[in-house]
Image (cartoon, rainbow, N blue to C red):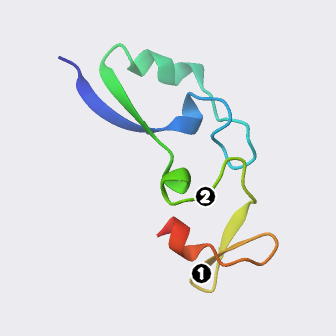
Amino acid sequence: MKEKLLISACFLKSGFKYDGTDNFDEKILKLQEKYEFILICPEVDGGLATPRLPSECKDGKVINNIGQDVTENFN
């Protein structure tokens, strides 16, 4: 039985990054030889869509690029 590894879905699945693309990296596939991947997307799990507007931390809050406070989704 392989050890489990929690990994961001955007490293393996297209469309999971905030802009609808991915961060696919061929090197990560090699980890599947040793680990069973458990894919997550914290932002989607927090209720945000994919694709979604880019967001940044500002003054202790997370604000998207049109000024909406999405802090709760990231928490």
| Relative to 45, residue 56 above or below | below
Q: What element carries label 1?
A: strand
Q: Where is residue 38 in the image (x, y as percent from the top left)?
A: 37, 33
Looking at the rendering, in which quadrant would you find the N terminus? top left
Judge whether 31 appears above or below 40 on screen.
Answer: above
**Relative horizontal placement of residue 57, taking residue 19 as reference (left or right):** left
Q: Which amino acid does label 1 sit on?
A: Lys
The residue that appears at 52% across and 36% down in the rendered structure is 9
Direction from residue 58 to residue 8 in the image, left or right: left
Image position, residue 73 (x, y; %): 54, 67
Where on the picture, by quarter, is residue 23? top right
Question: What residue sits 37% from the left and 28% below the top?
Answer: 37
Of pointers 2 and 1, the one earlier in the residue sequence? 2
Q: Which residue is drawn at 46% across and 70% down?
A: 75
Residue at position x 72%, y 48% from top?
A: 51
Picture coordinates of residue 42, whole percent (x, y): 49, 53
Circle 1 is placed at which residue position? 61
Q: Where is residue 28 in the image (x, y as percent from the top left)?
A: 49, 24
Residue assigned mark 2: 48
Q: Nearer the viewer, mark 2 or mark 1?
A: 2
The kind of residue on which mark 2 rests is Leu
Mark 2 residue element: loop
Mark 2–mark 1 CB contact (< 8 Å): no
* Category of crowding for the residue at label 2, using alpha-carbon neighbours closer than 10 angstroms: few (below 14), some (14–19), many (at least 20): some
